[in-house]
Image (cartoon, rainbow, N blue to C red):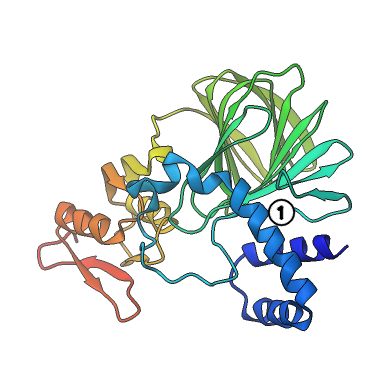
Amino acid sequence: MLRREAATWFARLQSGRDPETELQFRRWHDRDPAHAAAYARIRETYDRTAVLRHSKLASATPARAGVGAGEPRHAWALAAAIALVIAAGLYLASGGVLALGGTEAVMLTTDIGEIREVRLSDGTKLTLDTSTSVEVELGPSSSRAVIKAGRARFDLARSDAPFVIEAGSTRVSADGGILDVANVDGETMVDVLAGNASVRTESGGSKADVGVAAGEGIVAAPGIAASRHALVASNWTSGKLEFKATPLDAAVALANRYSKRKIIVEPGLGKLRVTGAFRAGDASGFSAALAEAFHLSAKQEANGNLLLSRGASGPP
């Protein structure tokens, strides 16, 4: 019971810095040496099994841009860690996951500006984009992932049983292949890079199953019929942002997801079209490139954000 209680605190601290949670944790931790010892054992187990922090992608400079290497981190909450999903069941200290009737469960999260890669026990390779939270359950007869927020790439291991991915009200099922699935601002996006997938969308109270082949994607949102599109080459897993005639406001919105410093666009400039590749998390470099391309002014505000506005020779 004490081990589960310590694991619960560990999981809560992964969800983000919250002063009240941290204060409650300190009180619990310091109340009894047994509490401190139990928490230390959970931390030790995590240190042995936290495969995310050892991936090549996790340490790549482009993917980590936007979070300074020297940025202080809270001593008790490791950002972008594997958070243990605490529920009814037995925590396996040797594996760092939960066993729920033969099903392994784990929660994966990334911080702002981080892209991380992890290989699941079934052989599936999962890459998490910035500010992403995914719950995964791997069972003997079925596997399921729920994207709470953000975007993830699933390089699925071949299996007789389909791997089900849920994002918002959309349900994706595939028995192999490579899929990008996102749940951002109430909108669900499914891109099939390899293989085939069955996508169930919901609109107006009715559900529809559609097949999506490699090179195709679907965008769905509550109350709006899903739309199909052809894929445009994307290299986000390497930490690059690629745009092709993308409206400036959309390009900046995407870039801002990777940086704690935000780019603010003056009203009236959002329809300018952006083409090119940029390093994710480099707000200063991106804003400078935009300013040069469109003859804008890029100024840093007191809060550290960057304001793009019309320059003397900028667009009307």
Q: Dividing the image into 4 quarters, which one contains the N terminus? A: bottom right
User: Relative to residue 223, is residue 38 depicted above or below?
Assistant: below
Q: Residues within 10 Å of mark 1 (few under 14, many from 20)?
A: many
Query: Count of labels shown?
Result: 1
Position of residue 28 measured from the top left corner of the image (x, y, whole percent):
76, 79
The residue that appears at 76% across and 77% down in the rendered structure is 33
**Residue 86 appears in which quarter of the rendering?**
bottom right
> Does any portion of residue 133 appear in the rendered image?
no
User: Relative to residue 52, is residue 12 depicted above or below?
Assistant: below
Depth check: give the residue in front, 266 or 197: 197
Position of residue 69 measured from the top left corner of the image (x, y, whole percent):
36, 62
Residue flagged by tag 1: what amino acid is it?
Leu
Position of residue 23 measured from the top left corner of the image (x, y, whole percent):
67, 82
Please indicate whether residue 85 sits to the left or right of residue 81 in the image.
Answer: right
The residue that appears at 79% across and 79% down in the rendered structure is 32
Depth check: give the residue in front, 238 or 253: 238
User: Please, which residue is most extreme toward the left here?
Assistant: 313
Please indicate whether residue 42 sits to the left or right of residue 192 in the image.
Answer: right
- Under tag 1, what secondary structure? loop
Q: Dividing the image into 4 quarters, which one contains the C terminus? A: bottom left
**Residue 212 appears in which quarter of the rendering?**
top right
Position of residue 271 measured from the top left corner of the image (x, y, whole percent):
32, 52
The residue that appears at 40% across and 34% down in the rendered structure is 234
Please indicate whether residue 114 sits to the left or right of residue 217 in the image.
Answer: left
Residue at the spot of label 1 = 84
User: Relative to residue 278, is residue 32 depicted above or below?
Assistant: below
The residue that appears at 26% across and 61% down in the rendered structure is 284
